[in-house]
Amino acid sequence: MAFGRLERTTGPPPMSDINMTPLIDVMLVLLVIFMITAPLMTSSLKLDLPRSDAAAPSNTPEFIAVALDAQGRLFFGDEPLDAATFTTRVADAARRNPRLEVQLRADQGVPYGRVAELIGIVQKAGLTRIGFVAQSAGSGP
């Protein structure tokens, strides 16, 4: 009695090559992520901000960042400027968009009078929305 063929056919041989497409896709996604986040992580301005339990990051889409360091130098973003140039840059920003928020960072060693002068410059330019940036009390130095 014959129940079928007696010879057995072997299946396809196992693949010995690695499929590189998923690995390349993952690497390209990681490359794009690092290309986008790397410029955001390079903040060269080092300030000793005051600490507060109520400090929380702002979700304001349009803002300018101004800062005063311990030596009393003015910064527009991360760029150090003299007082006259700083005043004109703030006035230009206010002229372009009067609803901008100013995020003010001041080293805790800066006298309050100097901070008040900076607030006066910003208000004289026409920007009235001023937010004070502080570190949260639980964060490191």
Image (spheres, rainbow, N blue to C red):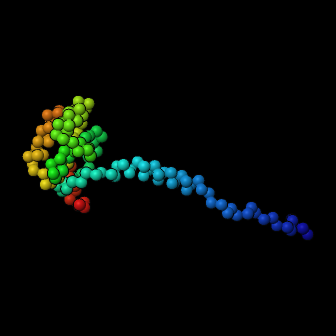
In this rendering, position of residue 68 left or right of residue 26? left
Q: Position of residue 70 (x, y in %)?
A: 16, 53
Q: Work out whether residue 55 can be spotted.
A: yes
Image coordinates of residue 44 in percent, x first then y, are 28, 52
Can see residue 66? no
Closer to us: 29 or 77: 77
Residue 24, above or below 82: below
Which of the 4 quarters of the picture holds residue 14? bottom right
Q: Is residue 132 above or below residue 90?
A: below
The single residue placed furthest to the left in the displayed view is 113
Q: Residue at x 16, y 40 (%)?
A: 83
Q: Where is residue 84 in the image (x, y as percent from the top left)?
A: 17, 37
Q: Residue at x 47, y 53 (%)?
A: 30
Q: Which residue is drawn at 23% across and 32% down?
A: 92
Residue at the right extreme? Answer: 1
Examine the image and state in which quarter residue 117 appears: top left
| Identity of the residue drawn at 30% across and 51% down | 43
Q: Quadrant of the C terminus?
A: bottom left
In the picture, which quadrant includes the N terminus?
bottom right
Q: Nearer the viewer, residue 141 or 86?
A: 86
